[in-house]
Image: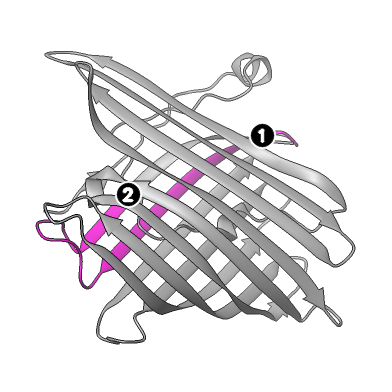
Amino acid sequence: MRRLQQHFPMQVPNAFITASLMILFIGSTDLQAQLVNVEKSRKDAKPGLQGHVDLNLMLTQNTRQIFEAGTSALLQYTRERHTILLLNNIGLMRVEGDNLINNGFQHLRYNYSLGTGFTTAEIFTQHQYNSIRLLQRRFLLGGGPRFRIYETDDLGVYIAPLVMYEQELLSDDDKTQTDKFKGDLYVSITYTLNERINFTHTTYYQPDFAIMKEYRISSETGFEMKFNESFSFLVTFNLAYDSAPPMNIPELFYTLKNGIKYNF
């Protein structure tokens, strides 16, 4: 069964933007993909601390009462060649008081820029859970080089052939746990149309080194339009494919959503 999520924007007056710190409008369930896209959350390597915060809220009352909430936060600290990135995401949906979807992740990444900045060394760790994908717990630890293939003021292309260790516990009847070494190859493209509008695209490919025919692919394309230095309007399309998902879980997931982001 394929699932589609669409988020329909409302008209947002200027007074609302300046008075509210963060409100997102949601149209359906947030189906968090198994692969976490860190590239879209990176900030320009400005010295010091910076980040952003998102908050999603929805309440629907028809034949049933549906409440959905989600939050994500990014902190990034840069000093000379060193960058530390911390990303946290939590989502919950309740129908008539019963939890239907509970998902989230915590991601920590350290970057060290080598030489002229063409190559960056990356080390990361991650904890993740997702009830809709029967994922009780996933732990990742990995690293490798990240290469700047092309970069101008308007366009950036980056590629990273990383390696990671994955420990995964599924919440199925057998409480299945697996330990694997995998590749973590990603290609990232950023394009700035002008001072207010930019596009991003990232594709991840994660093969199992022991069984190469088993792999995951995740792709995310995003559009961001800035209202001002603090607030942006977002549209994001996610596509995730798992060649060997748990039983009764579809191989393909895709979502389309929009919202507002607060930057600091």
Give the residue at x 66% y 34%. Answer: 227
Q: Front-most of 3 and 12?
A: 3
Q: Is 178 rendered above or below residue 199?
A: below
Q: Which residue is drawn at 26% across and 24% down?
A: 94
Asked if the residues shown at circle 1 and circle 2 are in contact, with their CB atoms under 8 angstroms apart, the answer is no
Q: Give the range drawn in magenta.
A: 229-255
Residue 258 magenta-drawn? no
| Residue at the disc numbered 2 | 255
Which residue type does callout 1 highlight? Phe
| Residue in front for this viewpoint, 247 or 137 | 137
Label 2: how many residues lie within 10 Å, few (<14), some (14-19) or many (20+)?
A: many
Q: Earlier in the sequence, mark 1 or mark 2?
A: 1
Residue displayed at 15% across by 15% down: 64
- Quadrant (top left/top right/bottom left/bottom right) for the C terminus: top right
State whether residue 1 appears in this view. yes
**Badge 2 amino acid:** Thr
Q: Compared with residue 19, is residue 10 higher up or lower down, i.e. above or below? A: below
Q: Residue 236: percent from the left, percent from the top?
A: 45, 49
Q: Which residue is disc 1 drawn over?
A: 227
| SS for dot 2 | strand
Residue 26: mark? none
The residue under the point 26% across, 44% down is 131
Percent position (x, y) of residue 105? 46, 47
Pick the front one: 156 or 34: 34
Q: Can residue 192 be seen in this view?
A: no
